[in-house]
Image (cartoon, rainbow, N blue to C red):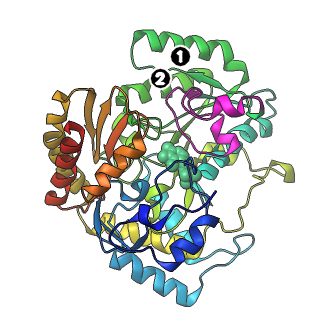
Amino acid sequence: MSAPSPSLMTSRQTAPDWYEKGLPHIWLPYSQMKTASPPLAAVRTHDTRIELADGRELIDGVAAWWTACHGYNHPHIRKAVEAQLATMPHIMFGGTVHEPALRLAARLCAMLPGDLERVFFTDSGSVSVEVAMKMAIQYRLNKGETGRTKMLAFKGGYHGDTLATMAVCDPEEGMHHLYGTVLAQHVIAPLPVDDASTAEFLRLLAQHAHELTAILTEPLVQGAGGMLFHSPDVLRILRKAADEYGLLLILDEIFTGFGRTGTLFAYEQAEIVPDIVTLSKALTGGTMALAATVARRHVFDAFLSDNPEHALMHGPTFMANPLACACANASLDLFESEPRLHQVQTINAILTETLEPCRALPGVKDVRTLGAIGVVELEKISNPDALRQKFIAEGVWIRPFRNIVYLTPAFTITPDDLKTLANTIYRVLSS
Ligand SMILES: *Cc1c(COP(=O)(O)O)cnc(C)c1O
């Protein structure tokens, strides 16, 4: 195929040289490259703004897939990376350790309620979930329990795009149907949100308990599955069920972690302790790729043995990259020194008020907010790409998917920018 013509990209100015030369060689994510609108040429970010090559500036409603919780280019994070870059940008983690990673591991364990106390670093969210799954599988093997290799995961769930994680995503909405025969078989249940779904969840649990090792879910919000919210009670049901059947509870906090739902970690709201937690997305304040799988003591203890085969056999080349760990430490500094959770409350109040009018628009099914997440759910979005282009024309970066238009802004967004985002959603959806 040929590159999109520059005239399509912008009428005001021709595209930069690197755009025209490079675009024909790039394969974009989640994109039908024959028909999708050409991507925007971004040249600079600051605070909650994205500056384009043609001089336009967009207010960002998504915070780079909800990672940039302090806004873009935060000076405290930049200084930390610069200092780390000067001393040690990277070193292998197989046999050497370093201050940024060890400091970060200790801080994460101190922040996470419960005896979550061992951190395994990776470089992407999907891989941190795979590591959690490997931990849960080998946990059984090391204890001599065979045949318990499956996860019980949930409809509406999303845990990543790799082959192992696709198999624990929603079977209808994910890519299951395309990859059906090559994916591992797990048990996918409805989240126990009411009597009927609880009965079905418990039935599947009883039926499959002998082959299960863990229950896996995103706590409070199923993010990429459609920003579906559930109450903390659901997590308490899962914890109780896991205890009854001797299963591990794995919580994927990759979307919810670091304040997004109003508490530092979503599971705090249920007052339970999971056995394994996965973190990524906002871990480095959206600056670098880094992920962590954090396990409780009893999980880690199952790997302590005189048998070398009982070790966790995993080790990404760039695991615990010092630059990324320095970003994450700087990001945690900001959670300590700046009022992030209070900002999330303010964002929630503004979103709840300003998105409410959307409820009356034709085709709107639901309007909901939780922490710094605002969702307008429609009956159907026939062309998410076209809708995105309308938002861009209005000067905002909002990326509708499935049947939802959502905001997950930086916690540092100004009330004015936030109102502009919400009001633009109303205006575009009512036009
Ligand atoms: C984004 C996400 C992942 C996958 O993370 P990647 O870094 O994209 O691999 C997994 N789980 C949840 C809940 C996520 O939001």
Q: Image height check: is 343 above or below 265?
A: below
Q: Nearer the viewer, residue 359 or 431?
A: 431
Q: Are marks 1 and 2 in contact (CB under 8 Å)?
A: yes
The disc label shown at residue 191, or none? 2
User: Gap in Å between the C-alphas at discs 1 and 2?
Assistant: 7 Å
The answer to whether 336 appears left or right of 125 in the picture is: left
User: Helix, strand, or loop for circle 2?
Assistant: loop
Residue at the (53%, 47%) spot, across then down: 35
Three-letter amino acid code at disc 2? Leu
Say if residue 189 shows up in the picture.
Answer: yes
Count of numbered badges drawn on the protein: 2
The picture places residue 277, in percent across and down from the top left corner, at 53, 46
Badge 1 or badge 2: first in the primary sequence: 2
Q: Nearer the viewer, residue 122 or 276?
A: 122
Q: Residues within 10 Å of mark 1 (few under 14, many from 20)?
A: many
Three-letter amino acid code at disc 1? Phe
Residue at the (54%, 72%) spot, across then down: 20
The quadrant of the rendering that contains the N terminus is: bottom right
Q: Image height check: is 130 above or below 363?
A: below
The answer to whether 129 appears left or right of 271 in the picture is: right
Q: Image height check: is 391 above or below 225?
A: below
Q: Residues within 10 Å of mark 2 (few under 14, many from 20)?
A: many
The picture places residue 86, in percent across and down from the top left corner, at 54, 90
The answer to whether 98 appears left or right of 261 in the picture is: right
Residue at the (64%, 52%) spot, across then down: 127
Say if residue 307 shows up in the picture.
Answer: no
Q: Quadrant of residue 13?
A: bottom left
User: Helix, strand, or loop for circle 1?
Assistant: helix
Span of residues in magenta: 153-181
